Image (cartoon, coloured by chain):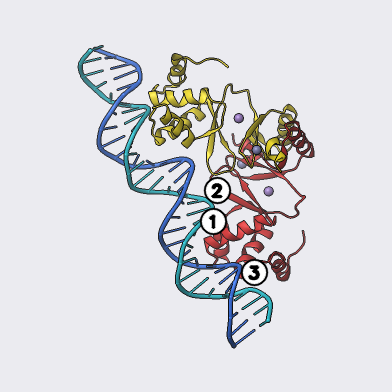
Chain colours: A yellow, B red, C cyan, D blue
Amino acid sequence: MTTHGEGSLKKVFRDNQLKATPQRLDVLKLLMTCSEHLDAEEIYQRLLKKKKNVSRATIYRTLEVLVEHDFVRKLDFGDGRMRYEQNQSPDEHHDHMVCQVCGKVIEFYNPKIEDLQELVAQKHDFVMLSHTMHIYGLCSECAEGQ
Amino acid sequence: MTTHGEGSLKKVFRDNQLKATPQRLDVLKLLMTCSEHLDAEEIYQRLLKKKKNVSRATIYRTLEVLVEHDFVRKLDFGDGRMRYEQNQSPDEHHDHMVCQVCGKVIEFYNPKIEDLQELVAQKHDFVMLSHTMHIYGLCSECAEGQ
DNA sequence: CCTCCAAATGATAATGCGTCTCAATTAACT
DNA sequence: AGTTAATTGAGACGCATTATCATTTGGAGG
Ligand SMILES: [Mn+2]
Ligand SMILES: [Mn+2]
Ligand SMILES: [Zn+2]
Ligand SMILES: [Zn+2]
């Protein structure tokens, strides 16, 4: 949970030969101070509310750049649009549980599953570069109300 | 690996109050005799080649019906289109490994992972209704050629 | 500061998968 | 065979995302 000053954020871009534009800084700052899993439109709307006008095209382009450089993870929960979350550190991986009623997202990390995934891949002479694991169902609150 | 006669396929639809139209039978027969993971366009093209002209709209509608009734599984490998595969039996689940170079799909089933997924869900008071697990990387052939 | 230019932006057109509409057709029951 | 509600085909439409291109701008160099 490091606090990110303005300069620190600019460094993120400049260290990668990218211009530190106000639009990029706005998008990155929003994601760094948000624990939710936002889609592009939600990012656009939240910035609007803060009088930060960034075009949708630029939001998509910035997200692409941030994903390429591993500052952001792009997630597909199967509802037709991609979601984005900060990627605190490249080694801090987690998977997701998504409630099909209220949309709540629960994050989890299970080292045993991670190890087994690697084993399964090896068994098939497959080089695992990434994986996705999504559990869909009902969160405790939504299961309660039947 | 049961062989499916024409009558057997018609039964699939009629048992569910659905008309056994030639278009639906064509789509179902193709999927039942195919071990690949086809998208809607590929299904359309393969039927065309066999002089079975089924409109794209009907293919989508038929797939929707087949998925609803658990004869077919709809898969999302994250490349922007859905893929479909026969669902031999409702209890015979498997997950997928996808080569990011050649697109090859390897199917696998790991009971330990399945059990752990259930445990993780329970730990969060989450009712798991389904899950997806995709391993992305390089198949043995593509890893070989560097 | 001032200049310069490749990189970035915004507006909007284009793409692509998938769904919807609606008139015409047809499966299946009597 | 006649009836009718379900299904089909053709094309319009929706929506998230990407591409285009004229305009703007970050930041290096002077
Ligand atoms: Mn997350
Ligand atoms: Mn499969
Ligand atoms: Zn819920
Ligand atoms: Zn391969």
Q: Position of residue B61 (x, y in %)?
A: 58, 60
Q: Considering only order in the chain, which callout, 2 or 3, is on the residue closer to the N terminus?
A: 3
Q: Considering only order in the chain, which callout, 1 or 3, is on the residue closer to the N terminus?
A: 3
Badge 3: chain ID: B
Secondary structure under tag 3 reads: loop
Q: In this rendering, would B108 be left or right of A15? A: right
According to the image, label 3 marks what residue? B19
Q: In this rendering, would B133 be left or right of C17? A: right
The residue under label 2 is which amino acid type?
Arg
- In the image shown, does B42 or A79 lie closer to the viewer? A79
Q: Check the image and report above or below for B38 versus B110.
A: below
According to the image, label 2 marks what residue? B81
Dividing the image into four quarters, tell me where ligand 3 lies.
top right
The image quadrant where one finds the N terminus of chain B is bottom right
Mark 3–mark 1 Cα distance, whole angstroms, equals 23 Å
The residue under label 3 is which amino acid type?
Lys
Tell me, yes or no, whether the two marked residues, 1 and 2, touch with CB atoms within 8 Å. Answer: yes
Q: Position of residue A80 (x, y in %)?
A: 54, 44
Q: Check the image and report above or below for A64 versus B50.
A: above
Disc number lying in front (3 or 2): 3
Q: Which quadrant of the figure has residue A25?
A: top left
Q: Position of residue A52 (x, y in %)?
A: 39, 27
According to the image, label 1 marks what residue? B41
